[in-house]
Amino acid sequence: MGLPAPLVKALEKTGITEPTPIQARAIPHALNGFDVMGLAQTGTGKTAAFGLPLVAQLMDEARGKPAPKTVRSLILAPTRELAGQIRDTLIEFVKDTPMKVGLVVGGASIGAQIKRLERGTDILVATPGRLLDLLDRRALTLEETRFLVLDEADQMLDLGFIHALRKIAGLLPEERQTMLFSATMAKQMEEIASSYLDKPKRVQVNPPGKAADKVTQAVHFIAKAEKANLLIELLDAHRDELALVFARTKHGSDKLARKLEQAGYAVAAIHGNKSQGQRQRALNAFRAGEVRVLVATDVAARGLDIPDVKHVYNFDLPNVPENYVHRIGRTARAGKDGAAIAFCAPDEMGELKDIQKVMKLEIPVASGRPWEELPDPNAKPKSRGRGGRPGGKPGGPGGKPASTNRRRRSRKRGPKKAA
């Protein structure tokens, strides 16, 4: 593919010999200097799709060491975990070169990060918030940054980083190469692409919202109070396999983890209230198999590459339907099989319908029957004909006694007869 020999040698050491579809389509454009917009679901090798051409071009420049506080290339990622994983992958690519890969994320000592940046950085992987903190302290400059990568750009929009991205872009040279990679095509993505990219080459492996082919999906319709018991029952069937369980809230994650621990499972929880050290220790234990069940909020839905995750449970359905695609993308990675099981309580029917609409499929039912979607408590009642009432069944939420409806109709009929 035109990659330099030292980089090909580094790939061989890691066992990589054939490109994935997104790599095969994106790398040639990037090596030719074009801006690239890549769309592919998680687990398809997006990190190497932008990392390999980036490292190759830095090798070709052969400009020596970067000047103090300068950054030759910048990669932005939405979460600490994803940023750390990108850094680890790139270190393998540059192992036999003088290039240095830096990492700046929240939850770590900013003083130590400032000290490392003083020496200059070839490739800096950063989360937007911490990068802005460091820029405000003048710990680094982006005036010599020739390459910019936005990874999981759609999640950066979900997390409210749009203003941070615009501010960072304003500090970069106009003459640069930009690559944007995402698993979904959010509405604002076109705006981001037009603002950051110059006549980009668009490469798309799978339609946005499509899950990996080897993920088996199913949904259980179950009352909220019974979810934990069903989860334990299903986990019992594969105690020796890794399972990732997604909950909606931080408190809910901790509560569920305690219940699973009482049931005899080696379990850990990660969410935004955990320190970076706690989150990393939990992930390391999960990767090593010391912890068999990891309970997480959507902080773990993107980019985490844990190849042996066999089962993903959506204990709570996500509010953002695209997040379902990212969650189940934690299994069936690198060509392996995986199962994604969703639990749907009565008040989650709206979320389930949105998910199925985005994915353009109906998730097979494993147990139970679809709930009747609950009416919006803030909606104004509407009559549905003789004897009908808003909310569906007589006596349902938001409805009025049938006799009241009849009296109202009889009053309306009166004047018509008189006329």
Image (cartoon, rainbow, N blue to C red):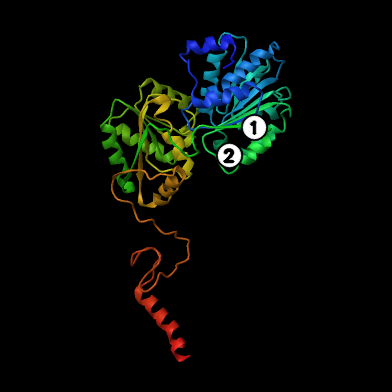
User: Mark number for residue 200?
Assistant: 1
Expressed as whole percent of the image width and height from the top left, the position of residue 201 reads 62, 31
Disc 1 to disc 2, how far (Cα)? 20 Å
Q: Specify the amino acid type for callout 1.
A: Pro
Quarter of the image with the N terminus is top right
Q: Specify the amino acid type for callout 2.
A: Leu
Relative to residue 56, is residue 278 drawn left or right? left
Expressed as whole percent of the image width and height from the top left, the position of residue 203 reads 56, 31
**Among the 4 quarters of the image, the one containing residue 113:** top right
Tell me what residue is drawn at x 48 percent, y 44 percent: 320
Expressed as whole percent of the image width and height from the top left, the position of residue 174 reads 74, 29
Disc 1 element: loop
**Among the 4 quarters of the image, the one containing residue 333:** top left
Observer-nearest residue: 275 or 185?
A: 185
Q: Nearer the viewer, mark 1 or mark 2?
A: 1
Few, some or many residues within 10 Å of mark 2 (<14, 14–19, 20+): some
The answer to whether residue 79 is above or below residue 10 is below
Task: Report whether residue 46 is seen.
Answer: no
| Nearest to N terminus: mark 1 or mark 2 | 2
Residue behind mark 2: 157
Observer-nearest residue: 23 or 226?
A: 23
User: Mark number for residue 295?
Assistant: none
Relative to residue 364, is residue 44 drawn left or right? right
Expressed as whole percent of the image width and height from the top left, the position of residue 251 reads 42, 40
